[in-house]
Image (cartoon, helix red, strand yellow):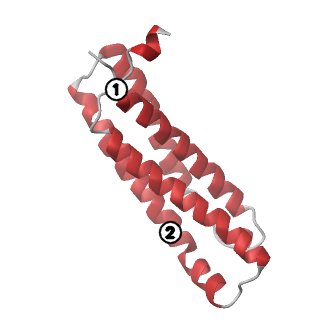
Amino acid sequence: MNFLKKQAAGFYITVLTVVLAVASVVSYLINCGTDYFSKMENHFGLVVCLLIAVVLDIIYIAGVNKKGPEKYFDAVPVVCGVLFMAAFALFLVARVSSIATILSFEKNAQTMSDLTSAIVGMVTCFLAAIFNIAGSFCKVVKN
């Protein structure tokens, strides 16, 4: 219980960022398995970007809790932010033409369901980037 008492807002925001990033990876992998998107090329670079960012965020939380706020930990949220935005851009690039096609020509229940899982993945990826940016301005551990 002492561990949770000494945590500041940055800890909880970073944990939420990790959860959103993992949800984005899961959503992308589910979307890759849908009928409409399974025929397309999958960009696993975004999965790699998200997983590296998750690992770095976990190392960041553990490092700040163990060693305190050191100067070299300040770069981790910046690197994670770049990785989250790169993953979002890759997700958008991979699905933007399909989104336009579905909404313009192939709009039915099945394609809209497949599209919904893609949009959920994009939104969770973007929210992970936003929460990462917000968490970078907050302390992880109370003094």
Expressed as whole percent of the image width and height from the top left, the position of residue 127 reads 46, 52
Labelled disc at residue 92: 2
In the rendered view, tell whether residue 141 sits above or below residue 135.
Answer: above
Q: Nearer the viewer, residue 70 or 52?
A: 70
Gap between marks 2 and 1, in whole Å?
31 Å
In the picture provided, is 140 more to the left or to the right than 96?
left
Question: In the figure, 113 relative to 97: above or below?
Answer: above
How crowded is the residue under tag 2: few (<14 C-alpha within 10 Å), some, or many (20+)? some
Q: Which residue is found at the position 49% from the left and 38% from the top?
A: 16
Point out residue 122 in the picture as x, y percentages from the top left corner: 53, 61
Q: Is residue 48 above or below residue 110?
A: above
Type of the residue with mark 1: Val
**Which of 106/33 is in front?**
106
Residue occupying the point 24% across, 23% down: 70
Nearer to us in this view, 138 or 75: 138
Q: Which mark is residue 140?
A: 1
Q: Please determine whether, in this image, residue 88 is positioned above or below residue 115.
A: above
What amino acid type is highlighted by mark number 2?
A: Leu
Position of residue 44 in the picture relative to residue 54 (left or right): right
Side of 43 where 40 appears, left or right: right
Image quadrant where one finds the C terminus:
top left
**98 relative position to 61: left or right:** right
Q: Report x, y in % for residue 57.
A: 43, 35
